[in-house]
Amino acid sequence: MGLVNIKIDGQAYQVEAGLTILEAARKCGFVIPSLCAFNHGECSRASCRVCLVEVKGARGLVASCVYPVAEGMEITISSQKAVEARRASVELILSNHHKNCLQCDKNGHCELLKVAEMVGARDGMYEGEQTPATLDELAPGLIRDTSKCILCGRCIERCKQAQGISILGFENRGFKTIVSPVQNRSFANSPCLQCGQCVNVCPTGALMEHSEIDKVDAAFKAGKKVIVQTAPAVRAAIAEEFGEPIGTTGTGKMVAALHRLGFYRVFDTNFGADLTIMEEAHELLERIQHKGVLPQITSCSPGWINYLEYYYPEVIPHVSTCKSPHMMLGAIIKTYFAKKHEIDPKDIFVVSIMPCVAKKYERQRAEMPNDVDAVLTTRELAKLIKRSGINWQRLPDEEFDQDLLGEYTGAGVIFGVTGGVMEAALRTAYFWLTGKEHEKIDFEAVRGLEGVKEAALDINGTTVRVAVCSGMKNAKALLEEVKAGKSPYAFIEIMCCPGGCINGGGQPFVKPLFLQNEDDDILETYRAKRAKVLYSEDVKQSVRQSHNNKDIQKLYKDFLGKPGSELAEELLHTSYVSDRERFPNK
């Protein structure tokens, strides 16, 4: 596209044709308040009327988020008419919004309050008609409070764009309008993936994760040996909660904070990731060598498993029976670790710090009882640290505890980004099939944040085709091929959240562009910056293949026997069932 000449508040600028006024203004150094997610229109377009500006020749004020720039356009942002209209729009939104901000889980991150401050909105200027609120706390992962909803529609669009399933929509009309699953059902009674992508874009506290901090507090109070593990993606984002730039590695300070919080042991879920690769790669080779069901599909993303069980139960035979890494590690802590230390497993309480909301549901599955006792998101961990008065910036860098389950490899680290599970599995599968390490440890063909990636690997003259995807909207085409028996792949990695766990529903909220200091396309770059943290840590590891993890080797020698053994099957594998059978009323 070419350039067009425009004027903003009397100043001349050249901008790319095709931009909206909102985008063009940002590039020219102006900040127009907006409730669009990341200023990329992930909302019911122009519904909030917060970004109104004047355009010469236009009839009345226009919503800058949907109005495209044109040659010779003259835009006025600072006129009294535009300023007053933006203020009135926010005051109207506030009139129907829950006012108890101190008790709101989004306190400190509420975009509505930030916008209200920017436009100078006054509370109580309009009196809205209060509709009886719905407080949905039935689902393990999510809470929905319609009293805090401002009907921006961002959650509706995110569910549609990321997962392609449109669980949420507008219900009722006029003052009675709410955002909800159909018929105002609970998330627990609808085919919701519990992925939390809707939470990531909600500008208020209308959608939040179901906190389990109280369960952790109770375990400490009861004198349990509370053992914590942290997923790889957590270290790539936790520092953002303490004012650090996106892409800051938080591993060492995070571990130091967990030690100060009093956990009995601080382990890395990367150990569980290495264990997953041992079992999953073994399962793949068994299928290849004995003409089993192919392609094999990964199973470590619980949001994806929820999608599978409801929408594609016919594909269940293709999915690996491996539990996800944190569930595997939980099972090993309560058996192998407990036995070695002569601890009654009933006295152990395992806490998983995850970037994912769906793992709150996963830990409660009937197929995996008692492996993990509580799941906290990255955001919940930050709350624990802040309430304890720990100064993040002054924390030293500390190491995870090296007690039977301490060593992890670079392969485990990259589990947190789309393509990472595939790459880790290929590193080990190649070795097991050829008896030698691949000349290049990095399988860059499966890297990148594209929705779908394909690659081919030559193993002893045999071409093995693989595919990687993230976001269920992207997975649908691959799954239709599998369902029809036409898939050309041997192995497929699927992650529920676009970009993988680095973009999980429990990760720190990313500020919208109007609150950013840099002119980045934040929607595209924040995932890449978090992914870079994991790839950088992978390269720094002295051991980068799961099968070379000495603690994993010792675990098999002393306890499990070998990958796929009877005990390994009992502790580390699971099963799936059609959601239509489990929840016929969904």
Image (spheres, helix red, strand yellow):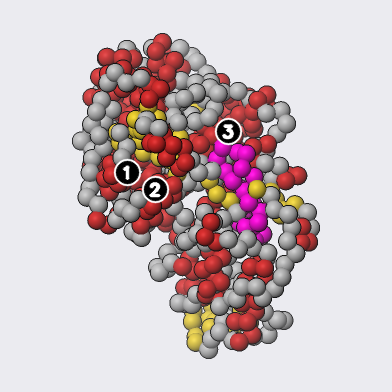
Image point 69% across, 49% down: which residue?
134
The image quarter in which residue 457 lies = top left
Q: Which of marks 1 and 2 is nearer the N terminus?
A: 1
Quarter of the image for the C terminus: give it: top right
The verdict on residue 270 being magenta is: no
Marks 1/3: CA–CA distance: 33 Å
264 lies left or right of 303: left
Q: Earlier in the sequence, mark 1 or mark 3?
A: 1
488 lies left or right of 232: right
Q: Do the numbered discs 1 and 2 sit on residues whose CB atoms are within 8 Å?
A: yes
Residue extending farthest bottom: 10
Q: Do the numbered discs 3 and 2 sit on residues whose CB atoms are within 8 Å?
A: no
Residue under label 2:
384
Residue extending farthest right: 173
Marks 3/2: CA–CA distance: 29 Å
- The reply to whether residue 25 is visible in this rendering is yes
Residue 346, horizontal then vertical, whole percent: 40, 22
Residue extending farthest front: 222
**Taking 152 as reference, is 200 above or below it?**
above
Marks 1/2: CA–CA distance: 8 Å
* Bounds of the magenta segment: 136-161
Look at label 1 and name its amino acid: Leu
569 lies left or right of 58: left
Image point 28% across, 23% down: which residue?
552
**Of residues 381 and 444, which is closer to you in this image?**
381
**Of residues 28 and 45, which is closer to you in this image?**
45
Disc marking residue 306: 3
Nearest to the eye among marks 3 and 2: give it. 2
Look at label 3 and name its amino acid: Asn
